[in-house]
Image (cartoon, rainbow, N blue to C red):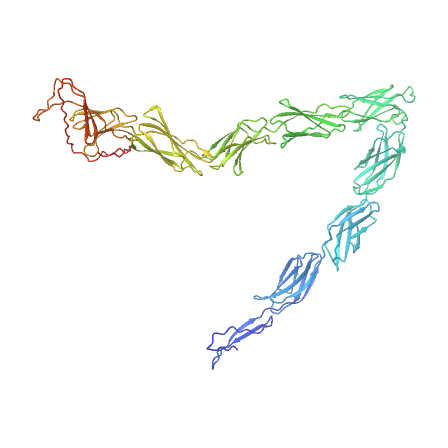
């Protein structure tokens, strides 16, 4: 019961003494007042599960796992078992029952095994624990040595202090076995059967628990003794053929012939027959066969004896001539021959073919001898080749045959060739020659059946031939084999970078021996782009605009590649700007601004240069060249002379180089002001004329007397008729599509001479005098300079300046031609 005082703060939660594990509790809470108690509040509480008890382990040695069992704990719904080794290895299992298996235990370890119980909320605070020692690890570094002489085997392995003893098994292929039991780390097995192969394994044991077997070691006992040994004499070659029945466990055999007087000979083979060579005549030999398996030699076979025939003929000699199939045999006489018998000469070759010839003299020629063979020659009485009347064998070697199957392999790295051929059994040395198409002759000597040449000239064809030789003769040349050296690196390399598709076309000259070519573009960061071709050009795509590349070409003959051509630096320069437009601004001081604009090129860090060339006033001798500075803007203005033709281009550039010029824009500037303007006539009727302005298409006469420009004449001609117009207020301009020139104010005036009566009446013509030539120049808006030529007979001159009243007209200038840019005019 919890008592709460109204004058105090709300109480803290009540804490009970530790509850018993795995129990369910009913809690009742009542509030207490001064005189009354509240109703009861009930709640059910489950305490945490108890720890499991009585943990039992059962180790499974073969699988290195353990079965766990424990007592059920009150309140537990699930159990977690964990095994942790001293080395840190952890394995676990979950179970809702009171048992589970811990698997994957490591051998030779001690695991601390614990089990927790849990419900849906809590896990037991305490746990049950037990230590578990796992099965031993298999013995390591097992080694087996067969002691051939004693017929036993010694097996050793690394010691293991945790093992109580070891079991060794040596099992044959037939399934029989030898075993031993020891507490040491070695064991010996004796009385091995000959010719057996054994698989040896060792197992460690502790407390009835066996480890897994060690890794198997395979050994063999000594081979058995060969049986069925017999032999026969070869009288011609003075050798003996020996045969036997194969022995168990044998890999090879050796036949030994021990003769009286220190003579001996032997032969070895992996088969069951062998020819023992070089037996001396007139000697008794004892023969036996020994088997071996590479580690042990078995016991000797039973022996047998052969006595070779005596040697009564002496001084036998045999001669060969190079590139001849004849052997000349000479001997000294021996013994007394009957009239019915002569001598027989026999020669057995190394391939066991036989040549014979008969003679009653002391010489004979053996025909049909072949190259690459060694012959054993004897001379005997023709009635019995194994009789007492025979010579000892005389060995003669024929010349080597021409080498066969000459194989050529190019050596790309050394720019050479490696040549091999089938070896000759009688050759002692070889000479290989290489004759080039340019007359080069190279050679190399070798005592083996291969030879190499390096540093050959590129793109050359060589004929290879090989000669074999011994101390007697050299062979004829092998069949010629032709090969081509590594192609020379391409030359005449050129590159054309196509900015529009970010590619480059490489071209080069053909190289002899090349079957294909590789083009390469290496960027500054080392990355490469490639193209290939069987012709003399290829296109590399994917260049980065604005990047600089080293372009090279490599030739290939399908096996080897040439070195790279000399690097050709080139950049993926920007394309020429497109959509170039030219406009002209009003004339100023007889010059006109040309404004050029274009579309920006898509490429990093691009700048532009505007270039304008042209002729002044159509004179080919008066040319000009103008250029902007490099700018990153897409427009520029240049000031050009009036009356000029021009050709405008723009090009782009960045660190990779400059582009070609853009498509040219041609045009002319506005014409220069008309020259030699002349006013002829009178105020009432006059003609104004001028000289042609270069490139002008039309002319305009303005009257500026009212303070504004009033067009009084527009014509394509070089003159215009005027009425009631004062020459002092006239201006003349020339125009074309580019604009209008500045006005001409300098006007020469030629007036008709008139006289007025003093009353101001009608003017009458003066007769008898010539008309003066008058020139009027406007000095300022309010000043005129009038000059005239003297007139013969004139006593005085009268100058009349009369203001002309303008007729009503539009206050401003005529509307400009929309296709023409006209300059602003200064008002007078």
Nearer to us in this view, 8 or 95: 8
Provide residue 772's location: percent of width, then percent of height. Answer: 17, 21
Quadrant showing the C terminus: top left
Quarter of image, res 489: top right
Quarter of image, res 87: bottom right
**Residue situated furthest bottom in the rendering:** 35
Provide residue 463's location: percent of width, then percent of height. Answer: 65, 24
594 relative position to 744: left or right = right
**Residue situated furthest front in the rendering:** 795
Provide residue 817's location: percent of width, then percent of height. Answer: 26, 33
816 relative position to 632: left or right = left
Image: 162 above or below 297: below
Does residue 84 show up?
yes
Nearer to us in this view, 299 or 549: 549
Provide residue 257's location: percent of width, then percent of height. Answer: 86, 35
406 relative position to 381: left or right = left
612 relative position to 778: left or right = right
Nearer to us in this view, 528 or 240: 528
Quarter of image, res 478: top right
Does residue 175 show up?
no
Nearer to us in this view, 383 or 334: 334
**Residue situated furthest left in the rendering:** 759
Count of marks overlaid on the render: 0
């Amino acid at each position: 019961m919890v008592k709460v005082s109204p004058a105090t703060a709300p109480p803290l939660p009540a804490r009970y003494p530790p509850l018993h594990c795995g129990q369910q509790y009913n809690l009742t809470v009542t509030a207490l007042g001064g005189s009354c108690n509240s109703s009861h509040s009930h709640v059910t509480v489950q305490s945490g599960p108890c720890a499991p008890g009585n943990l039992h382990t059962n180790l499974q040695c073969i699988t290195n796992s353990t079965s766990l069992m424990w007592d059920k704990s009150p309140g537990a719904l699930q159990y977690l078992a964990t095994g942790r080794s001293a080395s840190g290895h952890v394995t676990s299992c979950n179970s809702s029952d009171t048992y589970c298996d811990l698997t994957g235990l490591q051998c030779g370890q001690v695991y601390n095994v614990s089990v927790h119980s849990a419900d849906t909320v809590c896990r037991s605070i305490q746990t049950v624990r037990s230590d578990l020692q796992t099965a031993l690890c298999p013995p390591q570094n097992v080694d087996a040595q067969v002691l051939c002489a004693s017929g036993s085997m010694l097996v050793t392995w690394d010691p293991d202090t945790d093992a109580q003893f070891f079991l060794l098994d040596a099992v044959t292929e037939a399934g029989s076995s030898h075993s031993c039991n020891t507490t040491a780390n070695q064991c010996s097995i004796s009385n091995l059967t000959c010719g057996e192969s054994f698989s040896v394994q060792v197992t460690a044991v502790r407390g009835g628990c066996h480890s897994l077997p060690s890794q198997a070691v395979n050994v063999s006992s000594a081979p058995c003794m060969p049986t069925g040994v017999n032999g026969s004499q070869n009288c011609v070659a003075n050798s003996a053929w020996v045969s036997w029945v194969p022995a168990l466990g044998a890999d090879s055999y050796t036949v030994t012939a021990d003769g009286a007087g220190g003579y001996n000979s032997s032969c070895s083979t992996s088969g069951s027959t062998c020819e023992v060579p070089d037996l001396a005549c007139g000697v008794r030999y004892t023969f036996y066969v020994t088997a071996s398996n590479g580690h042990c030699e078995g016991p000797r076979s039973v022996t047998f004896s052969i006595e070779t025939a005596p040697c009564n003929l002496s001084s036998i000699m045999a001669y060969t001539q190079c590139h001849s199939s004849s052997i000349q045999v000479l001997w000294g006489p021996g013994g007394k021959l009957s009239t019915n018998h002569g001598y027989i000469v026999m020669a057995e070759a190394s391939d066991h073919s036989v040549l014979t010839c008969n003679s009653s003299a002391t010489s004979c020629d053996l025909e049909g001898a072949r190259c690459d063979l060694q012959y054993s020659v004897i001379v005997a009485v023709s009635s019995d080749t194994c009789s007492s009347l025979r010579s000892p064998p005389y060995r003669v070697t024929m010349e080597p045959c021409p080498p066969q199957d000459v194989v050529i392999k190019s050596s790309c790295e050394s720019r050479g060739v490696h040549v091999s051929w089938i070896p000759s059994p009688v050759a002692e040395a070889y000479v290989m020659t290489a004759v080039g198409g340019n007359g080069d002759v190279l050679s190399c000597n070798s005592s083996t059946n291969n030879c190499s040449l390096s540093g050959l000239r590129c793109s050359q064809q060589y004929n290879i031939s090989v000669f074999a030789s011994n101390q007697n003769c050299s062979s004829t040349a092998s069949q010629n084999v032709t090969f081509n050296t590594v192609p020379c690196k391409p030359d005449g390399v050129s590159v054309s970078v196509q900015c529009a598709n970010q590619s480059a076309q490489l071209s080069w000259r053909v190289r002899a021996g090349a079957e294909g070519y590789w083009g390469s573009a290496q960027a500054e960061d080392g990355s490469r782009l490639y193209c290939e071709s069987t012709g003399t050009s290829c296109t590399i795509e994917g260049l980065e605009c604005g990047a600089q590349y080293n372009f090279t070409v490599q030739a290939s003959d399908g096996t080897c590649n040439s070195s790279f051509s000399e690097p050709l630096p080139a950049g993926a320069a920007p394309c020429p700007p497109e959509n170039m437009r030219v406009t002209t601004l009003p004339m100023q001081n007889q010059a006109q601004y040309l404004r050029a604009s274009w579309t920006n090129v898509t490429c990093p860090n691009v700048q532009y240069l505007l270039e304008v060339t042209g002729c002044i006033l159509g004179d080919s001798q008066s040319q000009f060249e103008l250029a902007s500075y490099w700018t990153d803007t897409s427009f520029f203005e240049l000031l050009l002379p009036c009356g000029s033709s021009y050709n405008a281009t723009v090009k782009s550039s960045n660190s990779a180089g400059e582009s070609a010029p853009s498509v040219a824009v041609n045009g002319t500037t506005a014409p220069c002001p008309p020259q030699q303007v002349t006013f002829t006539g009178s105020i009432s009727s006059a003609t104004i004329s001028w000289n042609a302005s270069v490139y002008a298409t039309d002319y305009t006469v303005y009257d500026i007397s009212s303070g504004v420009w009033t067009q009084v004449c527009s014509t394509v001609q070089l003159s215009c008729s005027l009425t009631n117009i004062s020459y002092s207020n006239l201006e003349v301009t020339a125009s074309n599509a580019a604009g209008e020139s500045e006005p001409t104010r300098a006007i020469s005036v030629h007036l008709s001479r008139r006289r007025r009566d003093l009353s101001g009446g009608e003017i009458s013509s003066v007769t008898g005098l010539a008309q003066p030539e008058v020139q009027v120049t406007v000095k300022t808006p309010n000043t005129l300079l009038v000059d005239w030529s003297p007139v013969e007979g004139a006593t005085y001159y009268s100058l009349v300046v009369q203001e002309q009243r303008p007729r009503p007209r539009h206050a401003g200038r005529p509307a400009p031609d929309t296709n023409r840019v006209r300059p602003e005019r200064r008002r007078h």
